[in-house]
Image (cartoon, helix red, strand yellow):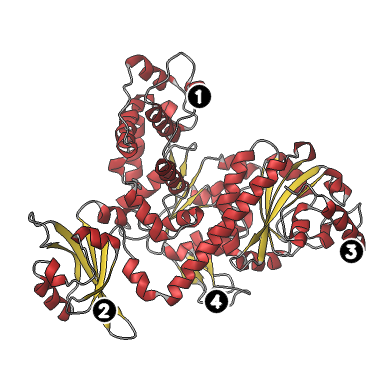
Amino acid sequence: MNKDKSYIEASHKRCFEYGVEKELRFSRRILTQNELNDRLIKRRKLILSAIPFMNMLYDFVKGYDFFLILTDEEGCILNIVGDEKILKEAFELNMIPGAYMSEDAIGTNAMGTALHEKRPVQVSGKEHYITAYHRWTCSAAPIRDKNGQIIGCLDITGYSENVHPHTLGMVVAAAYSIERAIENDGYVDEIKKSKKHMEKIFNSLEAGICSCDIEGNINYFNSKFQDMFKLKNQNTHLDDLLFDFQKIKEDIEKEKDILEQEVYIKADINKLCYNLSVYPVYTSKEKEYVYVFRDIKKERRLLSRVAESKAIYSFDKIIGENQRFKDVVEYAKKISDSKSTILILGESGTGKEVFAQSIHNYSKRYDKPFVAVNCAAIPSNLIESELFGYEEGAFTGAKKGGYVGKFQQANGGTIFLDEIGDMPLDMQVKLLRVIEEGVIIKIGGTNQIPVDVRIVAATNKDLKKLVEEGKFRNDLYYRLNVLPLYLMPLRERRDDIPYLIKYFMDRLSRKLNKKPVNIDEEDLNRLINYEWPGNIRELENYVEYILNLGYIPNGDKDIKDLKQENHKFIPLKLDEVEKRHIENTLKHYSNNITKAAKALGIGRNTLYRKIIEYNIEVE
């Protein structure tokens, strides 16, 4: 790709005309913090759409000294992630959010040149115009909206000795995925605005749907409805299909709600039963009714479990017989109803969010919202708007009506601040004010908004050490650490490993439709004695691994070595690959349907349908 490098010579010529000096080290244009905040909020959709794909691409190159940059259409850096060593060097050259990477600001580079050329480019070593960038190799691809207009650029940068044409290919693929995600979001917005009628008809999961008038004359039905009632032609009437239709009609005329009512169909001699819900739809012509028929299975329970702002875990779902661990569970129950802030400490994979949700469900706030926020997953310059929201007109391009932040969404309930150790220092000050005063102020607003929120924070970092290093506020640490809850690593509760293995084996074998793997005493002892650095999450992944293998590898090597040795090719059907990808994406976004659907590039309803289709267990 881009074997013809004539664009480099043309770019150098432009840079000379721009008056860019080859000894330049910093971009000639860097936004102030206030200017950057406005731009970040204005480009919020691009940033949030790009984050999962940037993280996915970074996972491929992690540990090989690369970093990724997202810019807007003018070359202004919006987000940057990468390995610590090379990022430090980039920051020393002021390659930071707010810095412009356009050719007139910093000379020839992949981002600026890609935006000018309107195509993917790769720039390496001395192909950069300024000397300071000769150490880099950069590959960038423009990001376009559905109309073909460039709205941003994605770049991956590493040391020049690591130049490889495949790097550019990866960036192009990631940029394409971002475009599709944004495009799908745009389609959803259009549907919401212009097709309310059709949205109500299809706002259901794996259901038979029809629309009709009050008399039961059907004017539309979907394929699922056709299968349910074994219809062969379009001309049909509900009275011909259902027992007691006249009673249903009378209830509708009396404006009685029909939700999850059991009905029987005439076509089946065994009186097959469905759940029926009826919704009135007001069109420009006349009043219609949407009939939604569902199989009486677990679909309705599944939908309620995956609803947003809900905690699904409870203490009775926590597996463990270790006495110290049981004491921790009892302690967590005792502090569940306290108004004081809880700080959950523990290594990655020990189940911090499981405990946070269980605490919420054990408290008097159980029927109120539970909102989880991963402080490490949100760009530092967007976290204020995500937590506190913003007012309409707070900046150019602000959403009409403003945006309700996570604290307001959690009002009356619990907000879970995961990875609190990654929260920027300036946001720590504002969080401290919320804890002390119980009020928030939206960006662009002046009014103090009271919020009644229980704060549960969590981290796998040593906050005391961060305080000593000046990376975490001392006063906030003590306000968060009122009720500390330490979750012990799995190696300190080895007696629970057999129980956890049995639980994961039973659950995952059903989910994957695999036979449980027999684990003899010798293998079990080997699993018990393994250190499990990834804790419960690693154990769950390993059980899934051996289920797919169909056996547990033999030998005296540790589990990590065995896993690496046995990563042989296992052919899978396409639907199994899609199912696993959906499961992993849901897990990554803590079962947030909206975020997972956006990352997958599909609508929420499509994701709901696939959850049912693949019998995916959402926890």
Q: Which residue is mark 2?
A: 288
**Residue 43 as seen in the image, left or right of residue 560:** right
Q: Which residue is mark 3?
A: 18
Residue 125 % position (x, y): 83, 43
Q: Which mark is residue 388?
A: none
Disc 4 residue crowd, few under 14, some 14–19, many 20+, Cα 10 Å: some
Q: Residue furthest bottom?
A: 285
State if disc 3 and disc 4 touch (CB < 8 Å).
no
Q: CA distance from mark 1 to mark 3?
A: 55 Å
Q: Residue furthest front?
A: 233
**Residue 116 as seen in the image, left or right of residue 454:** right
Q: Which residue is mark 1?
A: 560
Mark 1 residue element: helix
Q: CA distance from mark 1 to mark 4?
A: 52 Å
Give the residue type at disc 3. Tyr
- Let me know if residue 72 appears in the view: yes
Of circles 4 and 3, the one toward us is: 3
Give the residue type at disc 2. Glu
82 relative to 405, above or below: above
State if disc 1 and disc 2 touch (CB < 8 Å).
no
Q: Earlier in the sequence, mark 3 or mark 2?
A: 3
The residue depicted at 9 percent of the width and 57 percent of the height is: 271
Q: Earlier in the sequence, mark 4 or mark 2?
A: 2
In the image, 110 versus 8, the foreground residue is 8
Residue 525 % position (x, y): 38, 17
**Residue 484 as seen in the image, left or right of residue 50:** left
Disc 2 residue crowd, few under 14, some 14–19, many 20+, Cα 10 Å: some
Q: CA distance from mark 4 to mark 3?
A: 39 Å
Q: CA distance from mark 2 to mark 1?
A: 60 Å
Of circles 4 and 2, the one toward us is: 2
Give the residue type at disc 1. Lys
Residue 316 % position (x, y): 27, 42
